[in-house]
Amino acid sequence: MASKPAKPTPRLAKVFGAVNVGSFRISAMIMGETETGDLVVLGSGHRASAGVKRGYVTDMKAATYAIRDAVERAEKNAGTRIQSVWVACAGAGLRSQTTNVEIDIGGRRIEEEDVEHLLVEAQSTIRPDGRSVLHAIPAHYTLDGAHGVANPRGLHAESLGVDIHVMLADGAPVRNLTEAVQNAHLEVEAVVAAPLASGYACLTEEERELGVALVEIGSDVTNVAVFAAGMLLGLTAIPRGSGEITDAVATAFGIRRFQAERLKCVSGSAIASPSDHREMIPVHGPNEEATAAREGDTGAAGYARGADDTNRIARAELVSVITQSQGELTGAIGKALKEMGYTGPRAGQVVLTGGGAELAGLAEFTQSALALPVRIGRAPQLTGLPEAHATPGFAGLAGLCLYAAEDPVDIRAIGARYQNSMRPGASMNLWQMVARLFRAVKEYF
């Protein structure tokens, strides 16, 4: 019996790269889009962060080297090289604003020129106040005040409106981030606010419409974003993150930070259990003590505070330190949500993502503390995505790729095209005016 011929591998129509520059790790991903519109992860890579603190570049040379290293690891896994990348920005004083613009249509059919006219009019509503505009995206349109219109072209209305979402950032930190990427011999396609990218990965369209809070817990920064009506309506950056929990563990037991990080990730939890008092966990990792002794690192080889004679601590003590520190962070998250009006009947689900969301029991802990339904947001199932990167810590990177694939319209990019096609004296201007007049006569008579 003859075997069936293998299906041909779809050819790639586009290839694009993404870089997430965090304080704990710097990660990169290369994604391809096939001719049929399917997305496939070609390769990804990451390494420990360097030259970055609280989302800001603090050492240009170190940050550039780390970015180049992460991208080269992704290129090696993908078997291809990239020339440009989309970059996520988690710091830089991010701020979100929304605005609404409306023009008169007069009951006729809406044409492409009307939509472009509306978006050009919307440009004048952007108020950067000396800050950098990362993006100005039309979220959805309104017809005669009715919301939720995805594409108004071809419909009739007395008035056409649009809700614009604008993301602002401090100019200098964005320039430093851009320069660090460019120094790594890469062009920057765009700098995208990390909460917006994470929203693409972790939130459903229905959640963004009904209302949801996305909490991205990084090492040094926690971004709390509120989505509703399809837009990011509010954003608060908390200058603390999961790194403080690691530091609390290191301080409590007098151990090295890398040891505290391992204990938190491997044995830590935000929820205590009755068996924690009976379970003893080793402070040293496999072969760590012998390696430290050979290298003369007495700090790593020393005993933890309160450890037994084999350098083990009770899991209950570790969990106690973690829950106390996590409680302080959750309190700050709750305060931010309250200040943005995400409380009471207005509040819906909270989605936790980012590397700090990988702590065991965190969803249950946060749900109890905030008295709101909570789930963990992970990267979506994408073809070729490694299992190790299908986690909350890499959700923002995957979301950045999804954002790049969609490449939403930025109202700042349509001005020249509209003005060139509509200004007096432009080529074909007379024919465009005659065509519009003909359409109007045909429609009304």
Image (tube, helix red, strand yellow):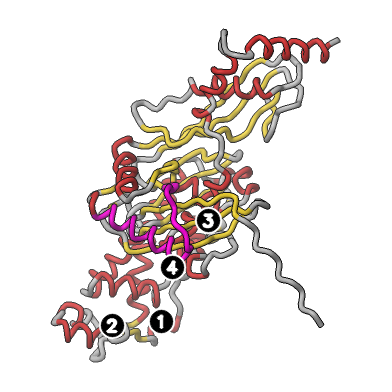
Report crowding for label 2: few under 14, some 14 to 19, many 20 or more residues within 10 A (C-alpha): many
Marks 3 and 2, the one that precedes in the sequence: 3
Instruction: Pick whichever, 402 or 313, lies toward us.
Output: 402
Q: Can residue 335 be seen in this view?
A: no
Q: Which of marks 3 and 4 is in front?
A: 3
Whole-number angstrom distance, CA of label 3 to CA of label 4: 28 Å
Q: Which mark is residue 359?
A: 4
Where disc 3 sits, the SS reads: strand
**Which label's residue is closer to the chain start, 2 or 1?**
1
**Residue type marked 4:** Leu
Please state which amino acid type lies under the numbered disc 1.
Asp
The mark closer to the camera, 1 or 4, is 4
- Image point 56% across, 47% down: which residue? 405
Q: Quadrant of residue 282?
A: bottom left
Q: Which of marks 3 and 1 is nearer the N terminus?
A: 3
Look at mark 3 in the image and give the residue it sits on.
Answer: 31
Structural distance between the alpha carbons of marks 2 and 4: 20 Å
Q: Residues within 10 Å of mark 1 (few under 14, many from 20)?
A: some
Neighbours of disc 4 within 10 Å: few (<14), some (14-19), many (20+): some
Using the numbered discs, state the Cα–Cα distance from disc 1 to disc 4 in whole angstroms.
16 Å
Determine the residue positioned at 51% across, 60% down: 367
Residue behind mark 1: 276
- Helix, strand or loop at label 1? It is helix
**Which residues are the magenta region?**
62-87
